[in-house]
Image (cartoon, coloured by chain):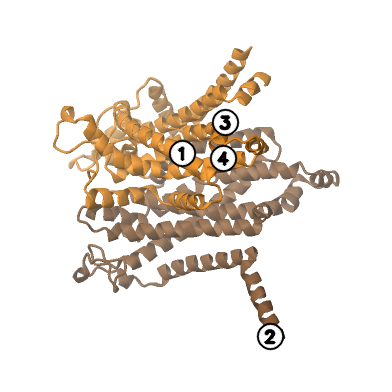
Chain colours: A orange, B brown
Amino acid sequence: MKNKYYLKFTGKYLLRVVTLLIAVSVVSFILVSLSPVDPVQQYVGAVPNVSVEQRAKIAEYWGLNDPPVQRFLAWAGSVLHGDFGVSLLYRRPVLDIIAEKFTASLALMMTAWLFSGILGFGTGCAMGMFHGKWPDKILKKLCLVMCSIPTFWIGIVFLMVFSVGLGWFPMGMSVPQGVPAEKVTILQRIHHLILPALTLSFLSFANVALHTREKLVDVLESDYVLFAEARGETKWSVLKRHGFRNILLPAVTMQFGSFSELFGGSVLAENVFSYPGLGAAASAAGMNSDVPLLLGITLFSALFVFAGNMLANIIYGIVDPQIREGYRNE
Amino acid sequence: MNNAVAEKRMSSLEKRKFYRNRRTKTILVAVFIFAALLGVYLSGILLSDDLITADFSQKALKPSLEHPFGTDMLGRDMLVRTLKGLSVSIVVGTVASGVSAVIALIVGAAAATGVSWLDHFINWVIDLVMGIPHTVLLILISFACGKGLKGVLIGVAVTHWTGLARIIRSEVLQIRSQQYIEVSKKLGHSSWWITVHHILPHMVPQFMIGLILMFPHAIMHESSLTFLGFGLSPEQPAIGIILSESMKYLSAGMWWLAFFPGLMLVILVLLFDRLGENLKKLMDPYSAQE
């Protein structure tokens, strides 16, 4: 019985994801087609002596004279076959670039994600426990200010303080310059990863902390906590037995739901630190009118966000007894 | 003599009452913030462009009394550039969040009209907009508009309405289930009439608060997009441009190029945030009693 409901739920969700992905590709294709940038000019670039006939031939070869719907179907058809086209900027298949850049980005995003999740949760708990007292007030003010700081500016400040001023960290990139790829040690990679990851986790850290604080304050003001205190439980045991159980779930869901901001933030953080990841590639593709890469990254980022939301839903369903019951009664 | 003391006490009590009243204080703070923001905007508009013409004799100066924020590599005063940039940000923020809030109001109210397919469709569109990471969507829209100011305005305006639309939808749904709406229906008023006369007035506080609280996001996204090179063109004074320029001189130790403009941006964002919170306290009866 139970499996049937899971199946129904998953099926519905997958259908939604598929329709959304189709819509994302349609919308992004329309947006790209609207651009006043001439793809042929962009492709020819600085190469001199390209005659008008040759340009016309390129346009004909690419099917630029076809109606937009036909062009979209051609593109969507090859995407379904796993062919995202060739990037104009890197002159390599888009899928290869996405795979390569995403591994670099994933290391960065996951570090930042874990960092903001764990530290943010801890700070939020501390704030909730000291609710209304001075540590809470100070931390809350700090978090509110942190929420208002643009990612790229804090990245620049980190660079100024830790790289230029103190010289603790390198000025950017993901590996030291002038060292062959196979000789780069894992320590060097981590050394290059710390500042971008800190920058990226800055914003979501404050969000998670404030959110956790709110939830914990709600829990601590409830009747069952009052009763627990009346039984003589210590603050710590109240937190352990009643606090964590009730606030961990929303925190986990929120953390999985933040994949969109994580990806968006990585575009900025990677640009500040010249970190060769997917975010930097996205803005480079936009700047250099590399349409196939831009479309590929947009689709991929949407998939990434949906994956995060789906994980959140699954985890909620598995862990939270109320929702588990909800499935059964649906 | 006693009288005088009593009078004094009375007046000090009154004074304290005046300051202690949260509503008065909130209004004062809100007015003050509004004046500060207006001041930044006006100073950016009124300061003449002559102040930021290139002057190589004043190149790369550290912050001093004459140039509180220092000067850049072309000898332009950073304070003037920052103020001009902030006023551009305020304009972009105003237009973009205004448009965004109106979209949110229309969409949110439409979703709550009770037409099932419309509600589903709008939720689906919201999921779609939220499904693409913000920055990526902004890059796409800016690319579609051929970069520049237009791209930033459209991009920020069409991406920020989702959150407020959801709030307005649930509010409208709540009001629609009230009895006086039923009565109004039975009295023969059309759905449009009810929306205009009974529902929209209730939306004013949410709309205003949502609008003001959208500002910080709009400004931050505008400057991030400009920083990435998609927004305003390099000749225009914008915080994003100033900061991306400053990246080149970071290793030269010219910290003031990035530090002060960014700090001012953070302060601007915080001020808008505060203004929104204060307005919330004034307009929303629930948070007013907190």
Callout 2: chain: B
Residue at x 36% of width, y 72% of height: B48
Q: Nearer the viewer, mark 4 or mark 2?
A: 2
Residue in front for this viewpoint, A322 or B69: A322
Q: CA distance from mark 4 to mark 3?
A: 12 Å
Element type at marker 1? helix
Residue A61 x %, y %: 30, 29
Callout 3: chain: A
> Disc 4 marks which residue?
A216
| Residue type pointed to by label 2 | Ala
Do marks 1 and 4 share a chain? yes
Do marks 1 and 3 share a chain? yes
| Residue type pointed to by label 3 | Arg
Residue in front for this viewpoint, B4 or B162: B4
Callout 1: chain: A
Residue at x 38% of width, y 49% of height: B224
Residue at x 57% of width, y 37% of height: A234
> Disc 1 marks which residue?
A122
| Residue type pointed to by label 1 | Gly
Residue A246 x %, y %: 58, 33
Do marks 1 and 2 share a chain? no
